[in-house]
Image (cartoon, rainbow, N blue to C red):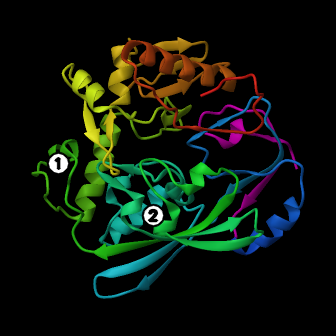
Amino acid sequence: MPQDTLASLTTLRLGGPAGTVLNISDPADWQDTVRAIGTQEHGPVILGHGSNAIGADAGHPGAVLVMNTRGIAVKTLDDMTVAVTVQAGHPLADLVQWAADGRLAGIECLAGIPGTVGATPVQNAGAYGQQIADTLDSVTVWDWDMGRPRTFPAPACRLRYRSSRFKEAPGRWTILTITLRLTRSQAAPISYRPLAKELDVPVGARPSVQEVTEAVLANRRRRGLLLDPDGPDARQAGSVFLNPLVTAAQAARWSAEACPVHRDSDGELRASAGWLLELVGCRPGEAIADGVRCSEHRTLSVVAYGEATAVGFGQALTDLAARVRTTTGITLQPEPVRVGQWAVETVRY
């Protein structure tokens, strides 16, 4: 097998050689995959589409498992509700469109988010006032410590703003399938004002699922939030910082300066990371470091180009966060995860 690289498996296209790349397309092959990995010195790296990952320049000497399993199974629960079990490697965009075509509500606002279904519980993926926690019923995982599959009901996944038990313990579990509860109904009430404006409806309205899906895609396209693999901003991992937690005093201070502040799904105050980056001088298209710049559309998406390195990209994020912290006292946390073998002395988030 020719040697692959982490760069070839991630949207940032950064990262060195991978020891062995195993593409998992058939769920029935999972046990064979586990046996093939055996007792390797280095644990496996698990990737879907690699749209939220920074691959290490040194690569990864062990196995890299690429989840390409696909499939949707539907079970009717009652006249209004269905349980939808989806393979981890299924593209999220395809699942959202499938639900819209079937007039199944619950995930319509996730249209246009790149990546696979299996990644959504890890980050509690969300947008436009909706998140996967709203409809998640259960997750089936492979427990590497116990050497067997396990099923977690949604409460046991500890989903919160862009986090979960799976993110807390990277490498412990590999998600194999997720099950959602979707409803045969209009879309969920629109809570996000920009989306209501896009739809030309009041906040709280319930358009059709298809209308909301199309509006979300249109809004994302206009804001440069759809990942175009052939465009000038192709080498990116979406938003590079989480909206940061702020104290009540910080919220009052920066709201007075027009910084958007909101309460997240956990009830905690968060400020706009994009606004804070603009405050310290970042602008769309602006160079940040060698081989690193803001996207042409927004400061919160940072793009790699030319001879960029993973260390250089990570250091650029660290430097941006330091600028914000020095100016405002607010701490930004990077969103992309680092995968592969990173030297201890390299970039620290």
- What is the tally of numbered marks visible in this picture? 2
**Residue 232 shows in the view:** no
> Which residue is rendered at x = 33% and y = 36% of the image?
270
Circle 2 residues within 10 Å: few <14, some 14–19, many ≥20: many
Within the image, what quadrant is residue 130 found in? bottom left
**If you read the primary sequence from the N terminus, does the residue marked by circle 1 or circle 2 appear first?**
2
Please, what secondary structure does the residue beneath circle 1 have? Answer: helix
**Residue ID for mark 1:** 196
> Which residue is rendered at x = 41% and y = 59% of the image?
132
The image quadrant where one finds the C terminus is top right
| Residue 82 on the magenta segment | no
**Residue ID for mark 2:** 95
| Residue 14 on the magenta segment | yes
> Which residue is rendered at x = 62% and y = 52% of the image?
48
Range shown magenta: 1-26
Amino acid identity at mark 2 = Leu
Q: Residue 116: give x, y in percent of width and height.
A: 54, 55
Circle 1 residues within 10 Å: few <14, some 14–19, many ≥20: many
> Which residue is rendered at x = 24% and y = 64% of the image?
187
Residue 261, compared with residue 52, is above or below; it is above
**Residue 2 shows in the view:** yes
